[in-house]
Amino acid sequence: RPDVALIDPRLPDLEAGEALMTGLRLAWPDMRIVLTGWSDVEGHSLPSTARPRFVSKSASPEAFVAAIVDACCPT
Protein backbone atom coordinates (compact mmCIF):
# COMPACT_ATOMS: atom_id res chain seq x y z
CA ARG A 1 0.00 0.00 0.00
CA PRO A 2 1.54 3.32 -1.02
CA ASP A 3 1.63 6.14 1.53
CA VAL A 4 1.90 8.97 -0.99
CA ALA A 5 1.70 9.42 -4.76
CA LEU A 6 3.47 12.22 -6.66
CA ILE A 7 1.44 12.85 -9.83
CA ASP A 8 1.48 15.26 -12.75
CA PRO A 9 -2.25 15.07 -13.58
CA ARG A 10 -1.83 16.68 -17.00
CA LEU A 11 0.34 13.84 -18.34
CA PRO A 12 -0.79 12.50 -20.69
CA ASP A 13 -3.84 14.76 -20.25
CA LEU A 14 -6.01 16.19 -17.47
CA GLU A 15 -8.79 13.63 -17.97
CA ALA A 16 -6.37 10.72 -17.45
CA GLY A 17 -4.88 12.45 -14.40
CA GLU A 18 -8.30 12.91 -12.83
CA ALA A 19 -9.12 9.26 -13.52
CA LEU A 20 -5.85 8.21 -11.88
CA MET A 21 -6.51 10.30 -8.78
CA THR A 22 -10.08 9.00 -8.51
CA GLY A 23 -8.87 5.41 -8.89
CA LEU A 24 -6.21 5.88 -6.24
CA ARG A 25 -8.78 7.36 -3.85
CA LEU A 26 -11.09 4.38 -4.43
CA ALA A 27 -8.31 1.83 -3.95
CA TRP A 28 -6.59 3.56 -1.01
CA PRO A 29 -8.85 6.22 0.54
CA ASP A 30 -6.21 7.27 3.09
CA MET A 31 -3.35 7.60 0.61
CA ARG A 32 -1.96 11.13 0.27
CA ILE A 33 -1.56 12.73 -3.16
CA VAL A 34 0.89 15.47 -4.09
CA LEU A 35 0.37 17.05 -7.51
CA THR A 36 3.16 18.54 -9.55
CA GLY A 37 3.06 20.57 -12.74
CA TRP A 38 3.97 23.91 -14.22
CA SER A 39 0.80 25.48 -12.81
CA ASP A 40 -1.77 24.50 -10.19
CA VAL A 41 -4.57 22.29 -11.46
CA GLU A 42 -7.96 23.97 -11.25
CA GLY A 43 -11.31 22.28 -11.37
CA HIS A 44 -10.27 18.72 -10.66
CA SER A 45 -13.12 16.49 -9.58
CA LEU A 46 -11.93 15.53 -6.11
CA PRO A 47 -13.97 16.84 -3.17
CA SER A 48 -12.39 19.67 -1.17
CA THR A 49 -11.61 17.31 1.73
CA ALA A 50 -9.55 15.13 -0.62
CA ARG A 51 -7.75 17.90 -2.51
CA PRO A 52 -4.09 17.07 -2.84
CA ARG A 53 -1.10 19.29 -2.12
CA PHE A 54 0.56 21.01 -5.10
CA VAL A 55 4.22 21.72 -5.79
CA SER A 56 5.45 23.39 -8.97
CA LYS A 57 7.89 21.51 -11.19
CA SER A 58 10.18 24.53 -10.90
CA ALA A 59 10.29 24.22 -7.09
CA SER A 60 13.44 23.27 -5.24
CA PRO A 61 14.07 19.69 -4.12
CA GLU A 62 13.44 20.91 -0.57
CA ALA A 63 9.98 22.16 -1.60
CA PHE A 64 9.14 18.71 -3.00
CA VAL A 65 10.23 17.08 0.25
CA ALA A 66 8.25 19.63 2.27
CA ALA A 67 5.10 19.01 0.18
CA ILE A 68 5.39 15.26 0.66
CA VAL A 69 6.02 15.59 4.40
CA ASP A 70 3.13 18.05 4.71
CA ALA A 71 0.82 15.66 2.84
CA CYS A 72 1.80 12.78 5.12
CA CYS A 73 1.83 14.76 8.37
CA PRO A 74 -0.54 17.73 8.07
CA THR A 75 -0.47 20.22 10.91
Image: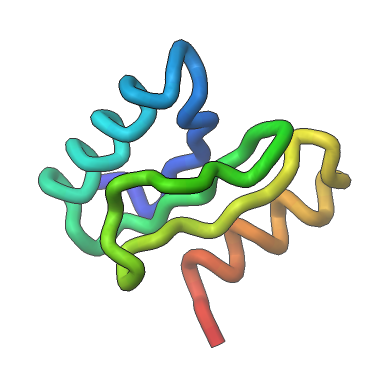
Return the residue found at the far top.
12
Q: Is 34 in front, or is 17?
A: 17
As drawn, 25 above or below 16: below
From the image, which quarter does the C terminus lie in?
A: bottom right
| Residue at (27, 62) in percent of width and height | 47
As drawn, 2 above or below 53: above
| Residue at (44, 16) in percent of width and height | 13
| Residue at (30, 40) in percent of width and height | 21
Position of residue 58 measured from the top left corner of the image (x, y, whole percent)? 84, 36
34 relative to 45 in the view: left or right: right
Answer with the quarter of the image where residue 51 lies.
Answer: bottom left
Position of residue 27 measured from the top left corner of the image (x, y, whole percent)? 13, 44
Q: Is 50 in front, or is 6?
A: 50
Answer with the quarter of the image where residue 22 lies.
Answer: top left
| Residue at (29, 31) in percent of width and height | 20
Q: Is 53 in front, or is 44?
A: 44
Q: Is 50 in front, or is 32?
A: 50
73 relative to 56 in the view: left or right: left
Position of residue 56 measured from the top left corner of the image (x, y, whole percent)? 73, 43
Return the residue found at the far front.
43
Position of residue 45 measured from the top left corner of the image (x, y, whole percent)? 29, 47
Total label count?
Answer: 0
